[in-house]
Amino acid sequence: MKAIRAHQFGGPDVLQLDDIVDPTPGAGEVLVRLHAAGVNPADTYMRSGTYAVKPQLPYIPGAEGAGIIEAIGPNVVELKPGDRVWISSTTAGRMQGAYAEKAVCAADQVHPLPDHLSFEQGAAINIAYVTAYRALFDRAHMTAGETVLIHGATGGVGLAAVQIASHFGAIVLGTGGTEEGRQLAQKHGATQMFDHHDPAYLEKIKSATRGEGVDVIIEMLANVNLDKDLGLLAHGGRVVVIGNRGRVEIDARQTMQKESSITGVMYAGGGPAAVQRAIAAISAGLREGVFVPHVGESFPLAEAAKAHEAVMKGSGAAGKITLTM
């Protein structure tokens, strides 16, 4: 089969298309013929060698994908060849290996992909929706009627957060750098969107809340926004940090009078049970059609380096970036 492998850490050019032996499923495993894989910022950090976890070289990147089960190993029940599935990380943590035509997965890694969703949409589920769900509920403890501000609401995680928060009754505000992206987020459930390039956008957000502030902020770039976020919070407000690219200075006094808080989230940071709870809720929403992944740009598997370059640019992203096989 063909697979993208990194033989060393470095820039996007270290990703090369190799011919390797097809994997074989063992006990409790399935072999999935992948049709698409999701591309995430964490993939680029791991490839560069700056991620907290360094895989053994050479390795196949990719923590999510979608396809059709081709074979099952011993002791696998309720799954069969021909099933359409999307892939999550294992209960023990992240998987790698989705940038390939085939991947062996633990049985608890694969989940039914509704017929109304494409494989590319299936590849956009795992990281974005589990992270967004855990940020909103496990960390922010969001409740219906609260006002939620989502920075970077036009990206993969941002759009997932918009859909989830809106579905569960929040008033959703968001920021985005392009008119196209802002319109897209409103289509997916945002009540109001703001251009973060506008010098007055913070005041406009405050006005949208009648000066009361927002209850929850989902933060994708804490090193740029965190101090400003604290000024936007309502009493008891919570900032959940999903993304950060450097150190930041804040005025911690802003947390005192409002009794506000700053917390962080990672996909598997709450342990296997937290991931499984999120997947159960997300799966229900996918079946019902209330959660609809949006794919902004796709690249052929052989162009994985270009996909990484697109992810690294970041600004102006509208939806998820995927690879197709």
Image: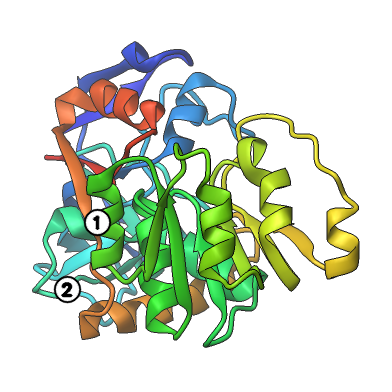
Mark count = 2
Front in this rendered view, residue 28 or 314: 314
- The residue type indicated by label 2 comes to Lys
- Looking at the image, residue 253 sits to the left or right of residue 262; the answer is right
* Residue 267 screen position, x and y as percent: 54, 57
Residue at (21% x, 21% y) in the render: 17
Check whether the beta carbons of the residues at disc 2 and disc 1 lie within 8 A of each other: no
The secondary element bearing badge 1 is classed as helix
Residue 183: in sight, yes or no? yes
Indicate whether 54 appears above or below 42.
above
Front in this rendered view, residue 193 or 292: 193
Q: Residues within 10 Å of mark 2 (few under 14, many from 20)?
A: some
Residue at (28% x, 21% y) in the render: 305
Q: Quadrant of residue 297?
A: top left
* Residue 163 screen position, x and y as percent: 35, 71
Indicate whether 200 appears above or below 137.
above
Q: Quadrant of residue 44?
A: top left
Q: Earlier in the sequence, mark 2 or mark 1?
A: 2
Front in this rendered view, residue 146 or 81: 146
- Front label number (2 vs 1): 1
* Residue 131 screen position, x and y as percent: 50, 60
Numbered tag placed on residue 183 in the rendering: 1
- The residue type indicated by label 1 comes to Gln
The secondary element bearing badge 2 is classed as loop
In this figure, which residue is indicated by the disc labeled 2? Answer: 80
Colouring rule applied to residues: rainbow
